[in-house]
Image (tube, rainbow, N blue to C red):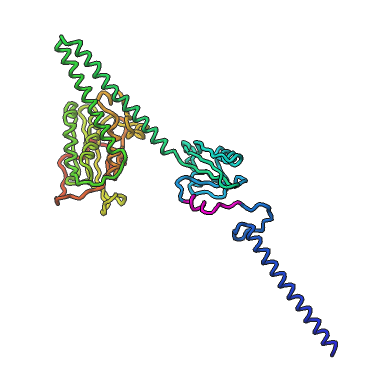
Amino acid sequence: MDVNVAAAAACAIAGLGVGLTASIAFRWSEREQARGAAGGNGRRGAPAVNSALPEPTLPPGVDTVLSVLRSCAIVLGDGDEVVKASSAAYSMGLVRGGAVAVEPMLALARSTRRDGEIRQAELDVPRPGVQRAGEPLSVSVRVAPLGSRLVLVLVEDLTERRRIEAVRRDFVANVSHELKTPVGALSLLSEAVADAADDPEAVQRFAGRMQIEATRLASLVQEIIDLSRVQDDRLLMDPEPVPVDELIAEAMDRCRQQAAAKQIHIAAGGIAGLYIHGDRGQLAAALGNLVENAVNYSPPRTRVAIATRRIASAAAIGEADGELIEISVTDQGIGISEKDRERIFERFYRVDPARSRATGGTGLGLSIVKHVAASHGGTVSVWSVEGQGSTFTVRLPAGQNPSPATATSLDAPATPNPLPAPEARS
């Protein structure tokens, strides 16, 4: 009996020892896990790091500031690793695989880390993704130290700004050249008139040429003014209902003399009684430019057609019913090559410079049409085949008729030649 009591006491003591040992081991394990989490900069599941230097962290408030910056932001650690990067830095291809992908940018960061100097430079970086084969992105890079171990890289995309500056330089150069031609001609003709004062016929001939150059100069100045008013493509603030029939009649009347001289018949067809909300002067200038181009670039004894119709479009701006008014101008002229169609709406671009100068063209007409369409929430497109003709189509949001009227078809045919229908070409 005494033996049994002693055995039971021994078992109880052994069980108590095992329990104490397990409790101590559990506590030690929890302490090691907590220590490992602290060494891993508070990241969930990070292993314990037995390093003398903790992983670099952003100073308080820096993360918030970087998130509201317009520039791309990249923060690099002392080993060139990316500690923080904005989404724009990834979309521009500046950061890939947790590292800076642009070597010149990385070299600037290393130099700044070495001497603490703030550096700034402009670089050309490849476009990301499928666009890498295109022109590189122009960026401005500013690198500055952030604390004792971090480097901040700010990147601003200058590509669009550079493009606008190039367009402005080209515009100024082209305007100067275009103004120089008629001004120089007027100067020479005035000298010729002075020298031929005793010859009435010569004076009359030179005076006629002076009138032509003065008209060309006035047209160029007016188109520059028109272009300056619409080139920002801002939507109109106070549009008014403009009848399409009156715009077409005004455009036909504007070109009636040139068309009669070349025996070109201008026909209008489609749906009558349509309205567009916009600026009457701008719309008249745009449509007049299209009809005038069609007449100028068409051979004698041909036809120019102006067709109108109403189409549905869910993308129409500011229109509850989503309707667009489509105005197309079709000619039987020389046509436009594929490479010229890509640039036809650029300022001062001419398909045939010699022919444009002979007809008094300035190269601004189609650019004005493009900007007028954009400022009215619409688009302009072109279909053309060399030797067969061209069709320019303007689509603008439909307006409300201020006085109810029943739409009727115009008498003149809408398509005077066997070209495909406008809707098949856009």
* Whole-percent x, y for residue 163 in the image: 40, 35
**Position of 373 compared to 264: left or right?**
right
The image quarter in which residue 175 lies: top left
**Position of 76 compared to 320: left or right?**
right
Membership of 66 in magenta stretch = yes
110, above or below 61, in the image: above
The residue depicted at 51 percent of the width and 36 percent of the height is 121
Q: Is residue 424 visible?
A: no
Q: Residue furthest bottom?
A: 1
* Whole-percent x, y for residue 152 in the image: 54, 45
In this view, the residue in front, 320 or 53, is 53
Count of all numbered marks drawn on residues in the image = 0
* Whole-percent x, y for residue 423 in the image: 29, 43
The residue depicted at 21 percent of the width and 25 percent of the height is 215
Q: Residue furthest top?
A: 198
**Position of 195 compared to 59: left or right?**
left
The magenta stretch is 56-67
* Whole-percent x, y for residue 105 in the image: 55, 39
The residue depicted at 48 percent of the width and 45 percent of the height is 72
